[in-house]
Amino acid sequence: MGPINDVATGARGWLLWVSLAIMLADSAVSLSLLSAKVLLQTIRSSNDGNHRVEEELDPAPPEQQITWQTWLPGLLLASLLCTAILSPMFDMPPLEPAIAVLFSILVAVLAVRALGETDLNPVSGIGKVSQILFAVVSPGHIVANLVAGAVAEAGAIGAGDMMQDLQCGHLLRASPRAQFIAQLVGTAASCVMVVAAWTLYSSAYEIPGPEFPAPTALIWLDMAKVVNGGGHLATNVLPTAIGAAAIAAVLPLVEACLPSSRKWTVPSAMAAAIGMYVTPNWTLPRVAGGLANYAWKRWDPEGAERYMIVVASGFVLGEGLMSIVNAGLKSVGVSWVWCGGCPVGFCSGCP
């Protein structure tokens, strides 16, 4: 075994393989259960003895609705544009990104259904399933595998976010057409902002590096290597990975058999897997936030219900903005001006 933080020979790399096995098992079982549930509901509806047909009505006025004449051409144009960009950029045959886009559209429906019913978007599982699919479509091609998984996961994330945005707009009686236009404007702006943010952070920090280890990227790379017959498992990790995967596969089955009031008693295998590869500086603040949330609800339930989300959003916004400021200062060579009494070398980048 090598150094602890070595992703190839150290304990960190060993944990990455175990967490990957847990995520694969949990994703496969959870997605299978969800698909079976949707299929059974469809069969029961079609076999209803009363042959009752439920008419789905859009509550928005006709002039505010988004018709298929609007979204269908846009979907086709976006799919063609995505294929045209990915194919030359990653040296892929046009058929491969086209399959990735088509698969992302299919899994987006599943993601929206899961998010609407459980408040959880199974994006990690969807990405892994896409990687397995592309191990068959394009065997031995690591880059194509990563791109396909990214496209599928991006489709699931986007569909879930838009579903929640439109639901909030519905509760506020906002116009769906106005929201649709705002989403297009935001998407166009984000294309610029994402590239600018990546350029800023990559110029200020080493990625992956001490400040930004990018553990999820390692998980994706390991997965791509495994399904394409490459990569090497860490020493003696296989028995542990198999055992962890077996436990992770059982947990969703147990949860499915319990009544809604008892489902909370089943731990999340996906959360455990994420906790294995995310460093403590990310997990410990989450624990502290959870404890603070619990204490606030016990002390002042009404205040917690009213202000908890606002306070949490403030923390997220404040850290995000200062992170951009820090990256900007570091990229132009500005060092720390005040260490606040920290020991020498305690904070990254301090003198």
Image: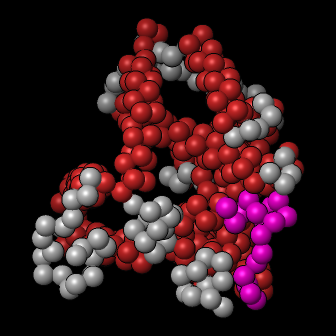
329 sits to left or right of 169: left
Give whichever of 162, 283 is nearer the camera: 283
Is residue 105 in view from this perspective?
no
- Residue farthest to the bottom, as pictured: 1
Q: Magenta stretch?
A: 221-237
Is residue 157 in view from this perspective?
yes
Q: Which residue is rendered at x = 50% and y = 52% of the image? A: 119
56 sits to left or right of 33: left
Asked if the stretch drawn in magenta spans residue 233, the answer is yes
* Quarter occupied by the C terminus: bottom left
Q: Which residue is rendered at x = 86% and y = 52% of the image? A: 139
In this figure, which colouring scheme has been used for the structure?
secondary structure
Task: Count numbered badges in the picture.
Answer: 0
Asked if the stretch drawn in magenta spans residue 301, the answer is no
- Residue farthest to the front, as pictured: 333
Q: In x, y percent, where is residue 332?
A: 26, 52
Give whichever of 330, 244 is nearer the camera: 330
Q: Which residue is rendered at x = 64% and y = 42% of the image? A: 151
> Quadrant location of residue 309?
bottom left
Give whichever of 340, 187 is nearer the camera: 340
> Quadrant location of residue 234?
bottom right
The correct choice, above or below, for 3 with respect to 86 in the image is below
* Quarter occupied by the N terminus: bottom right
Q: Which residue is rendered at x = 39% and y = 37% of the image? A: 193
Q: In x, y percent, where is residue 224?
A: 74, 59
The correct choice, above or below, for 132 with respect to 288 in the image is above
Give whichever of 284, 233 is nearer the camera: 233
Q: In x, y percent, where is residue 248?
A: 68, 74
